[in-house]
Amino acid sequence: MNNIENILKHIFSLKPKDKKESLDDLIDLYKLLDSPCDNIKIVHIAGTNGKGSVTSYIESILLKSNYNVGKFTSPHIMKYDERISFNRELIDDNDIIKYFNIIHEFSKSKNIYLNFFEFTTFIMLLYFHEKQPDFIVLETGLGGRLDATNILNSFIAIITNISYDHINILGNSLDEIAYEKAGIIKNNELCLFADNKKELSDAIKSRTNSYINVIDKYNTVTYSLNKETFTTNVTVDNFKFHIPLFGSFQVNNFLLAYEVSKILNIDNQTIQYGLDSIDLKGRFEIVSESPLVILDSAHNGDSIRVLIDNLFYLFKKNEVLFITSLLDTKDIKSFFDPLLSISNCIFVTSLDNAHYGLNAVQIKDKIIDNNVDISNFKFEDSLKSCYEEALTLNYKAIVVCGSFYLVSKFKKII
C-alpha cells in the first residue's frame, strides 16, 4: 500500500479488541523486528494528567542541550504525524508509508493484531531506529503496565500523578490505577513522580528502590501566575524560571523536567532556553484575544478542577461560558459539577465521530441520570453552531474543554 490517505484510513480503523492480559505478542513482534530501539535512552512518562506538558518540557530542554531527541506523544491535535517527531521535525508521509508496510507484513505473517495505538507505536520504533536519537521521550497511551510503549526499557520512568480516569479499563480504585501506572517500572530504574497519594508511592516502592517525589524534594518551591501574559513563574533552588504555560499545576510538571535536567547536569540557563522554545497546543491555549477564547484539553475530574482554579484566578463567577463534550469513559458528575461552580452557560456538543464519543443527546441523558441540573445547559450537535451562538453572548471568555478531540475539532472550524 503506497497511498498515505488509504494507509491512515486503515490505521484509524484498527479498533481495540479484547482487553490485553499481557504484552507478549507485542514483545514478540518487537524482537522479530530486531529490537529496534534497545540502544536508545528512553524517558517514559505515564500519569493521569500532565504527560504532554512534561514531555514537551523535557524535549525542549534536551534539544537546547544539543541532544538529538525523538518524541512520541498522543493524541494529535490536527494531524496524525504530530505524534512522532525527531528534533521537532514531524515524521513525513513517505516514512509512514515505508514503516506501515514493514509492520503490516511482519504482523500479518505472525498473525498479530495491532490496534491503532499499537501500530502507531511500532511506526515510531522503526522511525527512531533509523534516526538514532540520543533520547526518546515518550508518553504512554493509556495506563502503563499493558500499554504498547511498555515493551521498551526505560532510562528514567516518570509518573506525573494519578486520579480517576478510564476507570472501566484501569480500575475503580486508586490502588488499581497506581498499579497500572507503576507498571512502566520494570528494571529497578529511577522513577520520578509528583503526587503525594500513598497509593502511588506504595506502588512505585514495590517496583524500584530508586525513586524521587519532586514535591518532597523541592518543597520550598514558589510560583506566581501572570494574568496579563498567561504565563507562570517558578522559583526553585534560588533560580526564577519563566514558563510560557499558565497554571499552578504546571509547577509539578516543570519540577519533573527540572529533576531530569539536573540528573543530566544541564545548567539553569539552558533549562530556561528550553522553556522559552515550548509551543504546546491545547493546554490553556489562547487562540483569540477578542473575544477571549481558551482551549484546554482538561478531560477528567482532577484536570477540570485545576482548569476551574485557573479560571477563578482570572474571572468572577458567571463571566465565562463553556463549550464542551466528553467521551463515554468519563465520570459525568466530577466533570460537570466544577464547570457549574463558575459558569451559568454550558454548551454541550457532539464527539460521536471519536472512539467512545457521544452526541449531545446521549450526554444530556447521562447528565440527567447523574442528577445534574440541566437548566444552564444548551445541547447542540453542531460545534460551529455552539460557537456562533456563544459569540453573541456577553461573556468575558469562551472556554473549550473536555477532550483533545474537541480541541482538534474546534481548531478546524475557527
Image (spheres, rainbow, N blue to C red):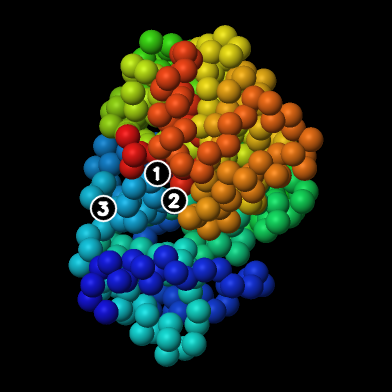
**For the residues marked 2 and 3, what is the alpha-carbon distance in whole angstroms?**
14 Å
Q: Are the residues tagged 2 and 1 within 8 Å (C-beta)? A: yes
- Which residue matches tag 2? 75
Q: Which residue is nearer to you in this view: 73 or 206?
A: 73
Give the class, few, some or many, for how many residues have Cα within 10 Å of label 3's Cα (few <14, many ≥20): some
**For the residues marked 3 and 1, what is the alpha-carbon distance in whole angstroms?**
18 Å
Give the class, few, some or many, for how many residues have Cα within 10 Å of label 2's Cα (few <14, many ≥20): some
- Please tell me whether mark 2 or mark 1 is closer to you in this view: 1
Q: Secondary structure at mark 2?
A: loop
Q: Type of residue at label 2?
A: Pro
Q: Type of residue at label 3?
A: Leu
Q: Which residue is nearer to you in this view: 324 or 373?
A: 373
- Which residue matches tag 1? 408
Residue 350, horizontal then vertical, whole percent? 52, 45
**For the residues marked 2 and 1, what is the alpha-carbon distance in whole angstroms?**
10 Å
Q: Type of residue at label 1?
A: Ser
**Residue at 36% of width from left, 85% of height from top?**
105
Q: Which residue is nearer to you in this view: 377 or 67?
A: 377
**Residue at 41% of width from left, 22% of height from top?**
391
Give the class, few, some or many, for how many residues have Cα within 10 Å of label 1's Cα (few <14, many ≥20): some
- Which residue matches tag 3? 90
User: Left or right: 129 with respect to 319?
Assistant: left
Q: Secondary structure at mark 3?
A: strand
Whether residue 91 appears in this view of the structure is yes
